[in-house]
């Protein structure tokens, strides 16, 4: 993992960095599980040529302490049929 993404996983409130990992297909999600409100989620896509493409997503709900709002983060492989079913239920 590039150093700039390791830094994003460090919690402002904890010195130690304990991470959790979720994997689906060729995508890996890494986040700090020391707190209930992960401030940043780092992602990695494993490419066909054996490389990695890194990015991160900021959890605005956790950072701004918006207690009335929730962010659900999950990792699962889904197909078009599942997406269509979910959209019909709306």
Image (spheres, rainbow, N blue to C red):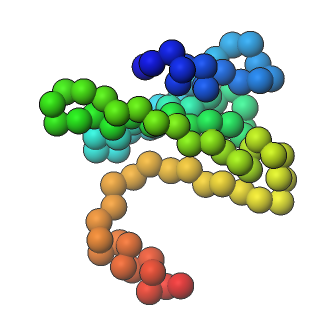
Residue 77, percent from left and from top:
33, 55
Report whether residue 18 is seen. no
Please identify the quadrant where the N terminus is shown: top left
On the picture, is 20 further left or further right than 78?
right
Examine the rendered structure and indicate whether residue 77 appears above or below residue 47: below
Q: Of residues 82 and 3, which is closer to you in this image?
A: 3
Position of 25 relative to 54 (above/below): below
Q: Check the image and name the residue furthest to the left.
A: 49
Image quadrant in which you'd find residue 23: top left
What residue lies at 61% left-to-right and 54% top-to-bottom? 72
Left or right of 79 in this view: 87? right
Q: Is residue 6 visible?
A: yes
Instruction: Return the x and y of residue 58 as percentages of the image width and height.
Output: 63, 42
The picture places residue 74, in percent across and down from the top left corner, at 50, 50
Provide residue 7's location: percent of width, then percent of height.
60, 19
Residue depicted at 56% across the width and 42% down the height? 57
Indicate whether 71 appears above or below 18: below
Q: Could you tell me how many numbered marks the image carries?
A: 0
Q: Residue at x 56, y 50 (%)?
A: 73
Asked whether, in this view, residue 89 is left or right of residue 32, the answer is: left
């Amino acid at each position: 993992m590039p150093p700039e993404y390791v830094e994003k996983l460090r919690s402002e409130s904890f010195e130690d960095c304990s991470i959790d990992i979720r994997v689906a297909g060729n995508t890996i999600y890494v986040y700090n599980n020391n707190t209930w409100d992960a401030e940043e989620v780092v992602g990695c896509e494993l490419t066909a040529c054996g490389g990695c493409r890194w990015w991160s997503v900021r959890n605005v709900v956790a950072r701004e302490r918006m207690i009335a709002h929730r962010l659900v983060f999950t990792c699962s492989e889904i197909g078009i049929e599942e997406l269509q079913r979910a959209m019909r239920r709306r």
